[in-house]
Structures are given as C-alpha cells and as structure tokens.
Amino acid sequence: MSLDDASRIMSEQQIRRLPVVENQKLVALGDLAVQPNSDQKAGNALTNIS
C-alpha cells in the first residue's frame, strides 16, 4: 500500500494512528507524520480527521 493510499483511507475512516506489527506482535503505534517527506500528506490527512 502506498503512502497516498494509507493517507486517503485514514482520512475516510477517521483514523489517526496505525498499529505497527512485526512477526505478528504489536511493536508500536505509528502515524504518517513520522515518515520522511510526508509532512504535507500527514497534515492533509489530519485536517480531514476530526
């Protein structure tokens, strides 16, 4: 899934953070704002999330 796809789905579903899973174990909660070069996309997604 691309960053654009994730951003769109997060906006549509009002999701702020996603679980980060490794080897079927939860390792963190992540958001788009921590991804390199994603500040604008994260801002756009969060604008659409109440």
Image (spheres, rainbow, N blue to C red):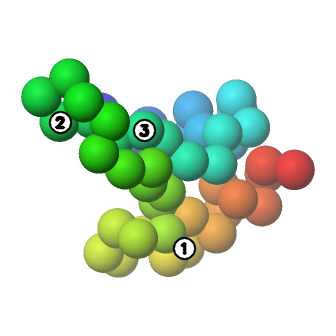
Q: Please, what secondary structure does the residue beneath circle 1 have?
A: helix
49 relative position to 13: left or right: right
Q: Which mark is residue 19?
A: 3
How far across and how far down the image is residue 48, in percent?
78, 51
Mark 1 Cα-neighbour bin, 10 Å: few <14, some 14–19, many ≥20: few
Eye-nearest disc, 3 or 1: 3
From mark 2 to mark 1, how far is it between C-alphas? 27 Å
Q: Nearer the viewer, residue 24 or 46?
A: 24
How far across and how far down the image is residue 47, in percent?
77, 61
From mark 3 to mark 1, how far is it between C-alphas? 21 Å
C-beta proximity under 8 Å, tags 2 and 1: no
What residue did someone put label 2 on?
Answer: 22
Residue 2 visible in the shown view: no
Q: Please, what secondary structure does the residue beneath circle 2 have?
A: strand
The amino acid type, in three-letter code, at marker 1 is Gln
Q: Which mark is residue 30?
A: none
Q: Locate the N terminus by quadrant.
A: top left
C-beta proximity under 8 Å, tags 3 and 1: no
- Residue 11 to residue 30: above or below: above
